[in-house]
Image: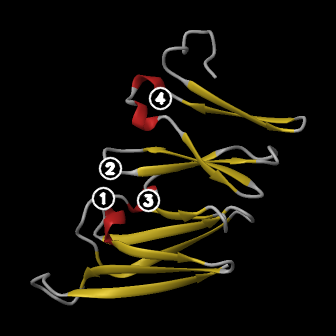
Amino acid sequence: MVKDDKTKYEDLYLRWSKGNKTGLFCCASTLLMRSYFIPKYKGENENHIFLTHGCSTQGEAILTLPKNTKHKGIDYSFVVDYDIKTGKIGYIPERSFSLNELEVEVVNLKNGIKKPILFQNICLIAPEESCIDKMIFEKNRVEIIATLIDKNDKMREKTIVEKHTLEF
């Protein structure tokens, strides 16, 4: 949806509804960028609609629109991985950008709980999500596996596989 006002060549508005409930999400300045940044339908589960879009040159973002429309849509940038079926998203939180430490936060959209993991070893790759090898999503847990530089190796040549499990 494009509003017929001064922003009509800049902002994109997404409207969704279920029954008589309607939600509206503004994608500010999206029309000024490449089509890569325009959200595209990816899938849905019982509670949310998932749309993917670019958030940087290589990064992916997920826009989640709640079906109950009591809540607002939320855009998650720098997504590592996600699972539509379980409603969980793993992403690099803004607070950890440009640090040698790797932090991943996982949100469970069903109940809104967010859980961070701070890896002990070093990620020297940018974007940081490239250090994550795999995320395994299950109903009540998420396992995150990363290959990192051993923090005790002064030459920064030795890699180490680090695993973390979050219980939801």
**Please, what is the three-letter code of the amino acid marked with disc 3?**
Arg
Residue at 64% across / 23% down in the picture? 1
The amino acid type of the residue labelled 2 equals: Gln
With 130 as the anchor, is 136 left or right in this view? Answer: right
Disc on the earlier residue, 2 or 4: 4
**Mark 4 Cα shell of 10 Å, populated few (<14), some (14-19), many (≥20):** some
Q: Looking at numbered disc 4 in the image, what kind of residue is underneath it? A: Thr
Q: CA distance from mark 2 to mark 3?
A: 19 Å
Give me the C-alpha separation between circle 2 and circle 4: 17 Å
3 is higher (above) or lower (below) than 72? above
Mark 3 surroundings within 10 Å by alpha-carbon count, few (fewer than 14), some (14 through 19), many (20 or more): few
* First along the sequence among labels 1 and 2: 2
Gap in Å between the C-alphas at discs 1 and 4?
A: 22 Å
Q: Residues within 10 Å of mark 2 (few under 14, many from 20)?
A: few
Secondary structure beneath dot 3 equals helix
Q: Residues within 10 Å of mark 1 (few under 14, many from 20)?
A: some
Q: Earlier in the sequence, mark 4 or mark 3?
A: 4
CB atoms of marks 2 and 4 within 8 Å = no
Q: Which residue is identified by label 3? A: 95
- The kind of residue on which mark 1 rests is Pro
Locate residue 54, reporting x and y percent. 42, 43
Residue that label 4 marks? 30
Earlier-in-chain disc, 3 versus 1: 3
Q: Is residue 155 above or below residue 72?
A: below
Q: Position of residue 50 (x, y in %)?
A: 62, 50
Mark 4 secondary-structure assignment: helix
The residue where tag 2 is placed is: 58
